[in-house]
């Protein structure tokens, strides 16, 4: 099951939210969340429940073992390594099981659950890592750890939050009207990003990167739309995750940030899936009073690991190495040279470097990537823009403009300033603005549900 399934958004999630309000005790809320998460996680695949209980039990026992071996660092490191091997194995077999397509015994693609396994494996190791580092005591209550491990709030897009950060909320949290309001707004907004906006950019991407009709502007717009499509899918999932957490009383850290030109390419990479990048950076010791050279080299290693964590394919590894090399170059040289440039030049630098580096994610072969690069500067193209790309842009121009205001920090601040200024004029205006925001959010959610239902029906 995924967040954009109608059965989830209209049945499982609302029922979970309502039933969890029947009792104020945290233990009751945890139990309801565990049951709902097991349904979410194992929907159509009942065997996954066995995997969850077995791996969570092992994580729990390893945590207890690390806690008892306080004076035996060697044993602690061994137990931590075993936990890391187990969770890596779970991730590879159940998250990247296409690696074993050549083997009939391990080719179980139809039976496995790739979605969310990366975050699940990270949480399992995160708990053992927290105990090893002394950030949290070994958890004696397995239900508390199970709440952390299987929560559907964290399944599809994180955040990769550590157990020491979440443990106090697992034991005691409160659902307030403010959390409910903010959570539902965040949930509906994220749902609209996935259903409405990502679909728009997918159509432009397919038209612009059509190998049978290569055009200069089509290649630019197609790749930008490729980035936009997955930006809105990921940020939409993150918004839904945080929104569901707030409805359940949890406050999760943000898993993405607005892209700012001052951060250059390094800042843009860190703005996406921030908690996962931070997790691997901490494991590699990046920034812990090491030299710039060490941090630069480890940045390349970290980027390669993160890219393979997303997708264990050669083009992802090459893109990760290229991104890491550019980050290292910025740390050593480019940051000082580019920091004084005006914002428009920094934005141009971000767009060009992002397209050249991350464009490789779209192509499975170097031939396709090279052909696209040459087309960006007009090589081997007959004309600038195809009719299909122009039509896709014009038909969706309103949603494209809305997407621009969402992505651009300055445009977003302008909209917020206008609404906040209107609300500050008095109690009546404040109420009118709040009502208008609520009606707009409800309309967007209803439109998203109808759009998704139409797409699923094939009408």
Image (cartoon, rainbow, N blue to C red):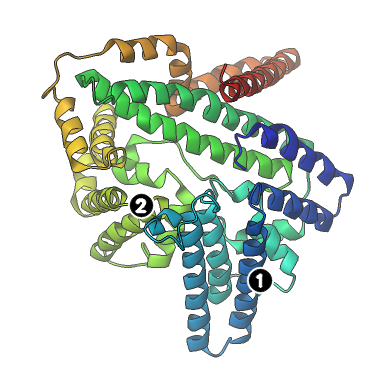
- Taking the spot 30% from the left edge, 29% from the top edge, the residue there is 223
Q: Quadrant of residue 449?
A: top right
Q: Nearer the viewer, residue 233 or 431?
A: 233
Circle number at residue 57: 1
Q: Quadrant of residue 205?
A: top left
On the image, the x and y values in percent for residue 85 come to 47, 72
Query: Can see residue 424?
Result: no
Seen as rendered, the residue at the extreme bottom is: 71
Give the spatial CA distance, label 2 vs label 1.
29 Å
Residue 244 vertical position relative to residue 211 in the rendered view, above or below: below
Mark 2 or mark 1, which has the lower sequence index?
1
Q: Which residue is mark 2?
A: 307
The crowd level at tag 2 (other Cα within 10 Å; few <14, some 14-19, many 20+) is: many
Q: Quadrant of the N terminus?
A: top right
Residue 17 vertical position relative to residue 65 in the rendered view, above or below: above
Query: Can see residue 104?
Result: yes
Residue 42 vertical position relative to residue 184 in the rendered view, above or below: below
- Taking the spot 81% from the left edge, 55% from the top edge, the residue there is 26
């Amino acid at each position: 099951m995924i967040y954009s399934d109608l059965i989830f958004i209209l049945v499982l999630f609302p029922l979970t939210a309502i039933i969890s309000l029947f009792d104020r005790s945290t233990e009751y809320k945890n139990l309801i969340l565990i049951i709902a998460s097991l349904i979410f996680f194992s929907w159509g695949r009942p065997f996954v429940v066995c995997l969850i209980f077995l791996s969570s039990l092992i994580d729990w026992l390893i945590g207890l073992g690390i806690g008892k071996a306080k004076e035996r660092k060697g044993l602690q490191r061994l137990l931590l390594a075993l936990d890391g091997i187990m969770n890596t194995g779970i991730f590879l077999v159940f998250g990247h099981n296409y690696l074993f397509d050549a083997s009939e015994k391990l080719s179980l693609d139809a039976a496995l659950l790739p979605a969310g396994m990366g975050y699940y494996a990270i949480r399992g190791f995160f708990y053992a890592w927290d105990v090893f580092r002394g950030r949290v005591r070994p958890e004696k209550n397995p239900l508390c750890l199970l709440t952390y491990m299987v929560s559907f709030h964290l399944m599809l897009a994180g955040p990769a939050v550590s157990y020491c950060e979440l443990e106090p909320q697992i034991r005691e949290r409160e659902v307030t009207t403010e959390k409910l309001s903010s959570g539902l707004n965040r949930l509906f907004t994220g749902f609209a990003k996935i259903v409405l906006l990502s679909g728009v950019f997918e159509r432009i991407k397919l038209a612009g990167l059509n190998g049978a009709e290569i055009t200069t502007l089509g290649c630019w717009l197609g790749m930008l739309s490729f980035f936009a499509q997955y930006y809105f899918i990921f940020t939409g999932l993150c918004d839904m995750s945080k929104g569901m957490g707030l409805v359940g009383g949890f406050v999760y850290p943000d898993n993405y940030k607005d892209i700012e030109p001052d951060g250059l390419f390094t800042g843009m990479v860190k703005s996406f899936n921030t908690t996962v990048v931070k997790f691997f950076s901490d494991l590699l010791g990046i920034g812990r009073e090491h030299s710039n050279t060490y941090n630069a080299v480890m940045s390349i290693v970290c980027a390669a690991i993160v890219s393979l964590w997303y997708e264990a394919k050669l083009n992802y590894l090459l893109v990760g190495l290229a991104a890491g090399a550019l980050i290292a170059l910025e740390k050593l040289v480019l940051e000082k040279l580019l920091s004084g440039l005006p914002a428009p030049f920094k934005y141009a630098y971000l767009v060009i470097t992002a397209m050249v580096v991350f464009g490789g994610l779209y192509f499975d072969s170097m031939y396709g990537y090279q052909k696209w690069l040459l087309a960006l500067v007009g090589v081997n193209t007959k004309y600038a823009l195809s009719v299909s790309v122009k039509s896709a842009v014009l038909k969706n121009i309103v949603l494209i403009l809305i997407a621009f205001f969402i992505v651009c920090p300055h445009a977003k601040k302008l909209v917020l300033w206008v609404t906040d200024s209107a609300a500050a004029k008095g109690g009546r205006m404040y109420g009118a603005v709040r009502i208008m925001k609520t009606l707009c959010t409800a309309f967007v959610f209803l439109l998203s549900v109808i759009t998704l239902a139409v797409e699923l029906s094939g009408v």
